[in-house]
Image (tube, rainbow, N blue to C red):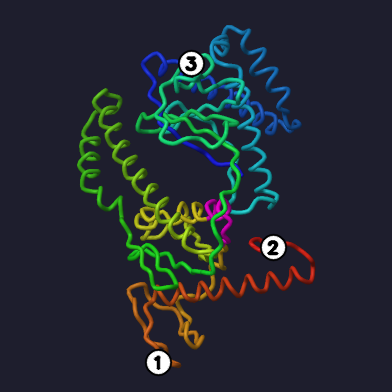
């Protein structure tokens, strides 16, 4: 499987200038190629191939007066920008045809130098890790990297990223072998929430750290300072960086906490079941700030890749499963309840339930049932089921 390993990079002034030039050249190639394809579509012409675009918008463009500066950056950066555009179009077409799961993918858009995130991508021909620990990038130079951990194998590609806070990162794609953990006999269902981040079917409760809520006071002060600065001024740019850095701290703390919580759950359980939550839809309600502060989607994605890496089984139950409405003791469906109802008594058997713990137990039961049904179907069709021998 492939994993990303991210490291902080500390370029000096000369390197920052060259990286800014590379970001700009990659952006221009993307925009030029995207414009050609959109104009061809509007004129009713056939789809412009990558070979044609590479010839016109990279090779020939370097010889023109208007685009001669494209030759000042590595050709790999320009070619990879075109490949990224091809991948974006493939994802869009697959989404339109219904061949891609998840949310619909929009058509590629034009990039701007004002975008919060700037990046370039390179293959192994354009970068190398030197013996002294520096990272050599073609036509940029030797970059100082904070190697926070060792990579398990040589990387196959590199992405240099500049985020909205002005920080630089090197993101390596590495092929790793599964790191299988000893098999366990434990299974767990997880109910994700806002008051309590997660409740496990064994009764364990994981409190919600609410990193954004805790940082709101400082963010409000910084936002007030930003609103008082003149647009386009240097002082406004300085305060904008301060706001972005504060948001970056919140994001980093949340990500670190997600990693620790997801690792603990995967390490302690052989099988994990979670709900297939519509985070994007819930994020459009009045609960949006709390939902995105919790970071359910990121947490579940971490569970997924860590389960695959360590030989665990993770499955999602249907998002319309009535886990909060059904009694986990007798199976009686008691109907929907407002969010402020945290405890309820089953009208059939009289059991008093904690809302979240009851939902976690029902998530475990529903996940077991779905897996059993899938295994029986596989037995008839001789198909393989994930997590089974």
What residue is disc 1 on?
350
Element under disc 1 = loop
**Of pointers 3 and 2, the one earlier in the residue sequence:** 3
Q: Is residue 20 visible?
A: no
Q: Residue at x 32, y 62 (%)?
A: 207
> Comparing marks 2 and 1, which lies closer to the viewer?
2
- 174 w.r.t. 285: above or below: above
Q: How many marks?
A: 3
Q: Residues within 10 Å of mark 3 (few under 14, many from 20)?
A: many
- Local packing at callout 1 (Cα closer than 10 Å; few below 14, some 14-19, many 20+) is few
Viewer-nearest residue: 268 or 122: 268
Q: Quadrant of residue 285?
A: bottom left
Residue drawn at the location 61% of the way across and 75% of the way down: 369
Q: Is residue 31 above or below residue 220?
A: above
Q: Are marks 3 and 1 in contact (CB under 8 Å)?
A: no
Question: Label 2, on which residue?
Answer: 389
Report how far apart the C-alphas of labels 3 and 2 lie in the structure. 49 Å
* Residue placed under numbered mark 3 in the picture: 140
Q: Which residues are magenta?
A: 304-314
Residue 242 at x, y percent in the picture: 27, 34
The x, y position of residue 163, in whole percent, is: 41, 33
Q: Residue furthest front?
A: 182
């Amino acid at each position: 499987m492939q994993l990303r390993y991210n490291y902080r990079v500390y370029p000096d002034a000369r390197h920052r200038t060259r990286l800014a030039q590379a970001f700009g050249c990659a952006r221009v190639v993307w925009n030029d190629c995207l414009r050609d394809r959109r104009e061809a579509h509007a004129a009713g012409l056939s789809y412009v191939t990558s070979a044609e675009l590479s010839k016109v918008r990279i090779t020939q463009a370097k010889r023109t007066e208007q685009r001669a500066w494209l030759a000042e950056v590595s050709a790999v950066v320009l070619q990879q920008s075109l490949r990224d555009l091809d991948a974006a179009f493939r994802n869009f077409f697959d989404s339109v045809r219904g061949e891609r799961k998840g949310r619909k993918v929009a058509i590629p858009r034009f990039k701007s130098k004002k975008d919060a995130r700037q990046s370039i991508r390179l293959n192994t021909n354009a970068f190398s890790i030197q013996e002294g620990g520096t990272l050599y990038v073609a036509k940029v130079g030797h970059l100082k990297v904070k190697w926070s951990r060792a990579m398990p194998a040589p990387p196959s590609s590199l992405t240099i990223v500049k985020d909205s806070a002005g920080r630089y990162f090197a993101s390596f794609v590495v092929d790793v072998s599964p790191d299988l953990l000893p098999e366990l006999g434990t299974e767990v269902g997880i109910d994700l929430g806002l008051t309590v981040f997660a409740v496990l079917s064994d009764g364990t409760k994981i409190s919600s750290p609410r990193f954004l809520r805790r940082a709101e006071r400082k963010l409000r002060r910084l936002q007030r300072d930003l609103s008082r600065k003149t647009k386009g001024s240097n002082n406004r740019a300085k305060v904008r960086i301060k706001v972005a850095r504060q948001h970056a701290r919140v994001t980093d703390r949340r990500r670190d906490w997600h990693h620790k919580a997801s690792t603990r759950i995967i390490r302690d359980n052989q099988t994990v079941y979670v709900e297939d939550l519509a985070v994007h839809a819930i994020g459009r309600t009045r609960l949006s700030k709390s939902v995105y502060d919790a970071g359910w989607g990121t947490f579940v994605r971490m569970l997924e890749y860590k389960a695959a890496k360590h030989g665990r089984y993770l499955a999602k139950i249907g998002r319309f499963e009535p886990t909060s409405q059904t009694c986990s003791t007798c199976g009686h469906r008691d109907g929907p309840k407002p969010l402020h109802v945290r405890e309820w008594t089953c009208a059939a058997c009289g059991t008093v339930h904690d809302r979240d713990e009851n939902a976690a137990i029902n998530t475990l039961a529903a996940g077991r049932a779905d897996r059993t049904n899938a295994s029986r179907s596989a037995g008839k069709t001789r198909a393989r089921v994930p997590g089974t021998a």
